[in-house]
Amino acid sequence: MSGLFSALSKATINLFNPRMLWLWSWPILASVVFWWLIGTFFWTPLSGWLLTIIPADTLQNWLEASRLQVIADGMETMINLIIFMILTITTSLVITALFTMPALVSFVAKRYYPDLTPMRGGTVAGSLRNVISAIAIFIMIWVVTIPLWLTGIGLLGPLLAAAYLNQRLFFYDALCDYADNSELNTLSSMNRPARWSLGFLTGLLQFIPLLNFFAPTLTALAFIHFELARLAKLRHTTS
């Protein structure tokens, strides 16, 4: 567990580096603009389709029966806002994984692991496959866990989806430039509970207002620190 908290603390410190301002701001701004444009032109039919999937009517009826009329009246607006936030943060995570990871990996490696030799075991095609499969399974987890939204464990679905997406998205891109194929395979099968725990902890940030704006870059930095530390340790033990 010390490795998790070390990665998170170092990532938090790095987040305040002036260079990080642009790297964390442009993915979230691009995501907001993208989904704002989608919402402007397509939100009415899209919202209606989403509300046929999400049990909004059932939840609204339950709230009305519970005399929580104020909440019930704003149920559709609240669901729309939650969906917008989730789509924005998720899109920002994907943009960070695809476009800003090389700069983030270089930033961390040069300052914390200057003796770590790049082995270039990953590829752009591998990164794209990883992102596509991660998003597909992320959506599947959301859809499968929708019925849980009306139960006491409803929050576990989004958290599980976020934890999966974080650890799947950023594991590969954190190591693709520095690990070779053998090291990638070895590290992929090692310490999975720790990797999922880091995904869960960073996933929590996505549901905290204001902090969720920093969540994509903070998540990326945390996984870079975590995975490069594991790579350095692996090479030390096998040398």
Image (cartoon, grey):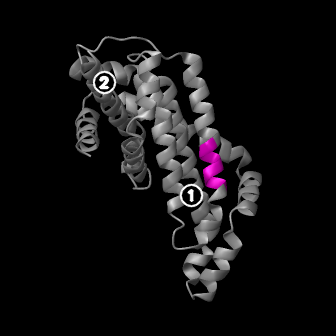
Q: Residue furthest front?
A: 238
Q: Position of residue 72 (x, y in %)?
A: 60, 77
Q: Residue at x 26, y 26 (%)?
A: 233
Whether 220 is among the magenta residues is no
Decide which of 124, 115 is in the foreground and name it.
115
Q: Residue at x 41, y 48 (%)?
A: 212
Which residue has dot 2 on it?
A: 234
What amino acid is at disc 2? Leu
Q: Position of residue 71 (x, y in %)?
A: 55, 76
In three-dimensional space, the C-alpha distance between marks 1 and 2, rounded to whole angstroms, equals 44 Å
Dividing the picture into quarters, in which one does residue 119 lie? top left
Which residue has dot 1 on it?
A: 81
Q: Which residues are magenta?
A: 137-143
Q: Bin the neighbour count of mark 2 within 10 Å (Cα to Cα): few under 14, some 14-19, many 20 and up.
A: some
For the residues carrying marks 1 and 2, which lies nearer the camera in this image? 2
Decide which of 36, 198 is in the foreground and name it.
198
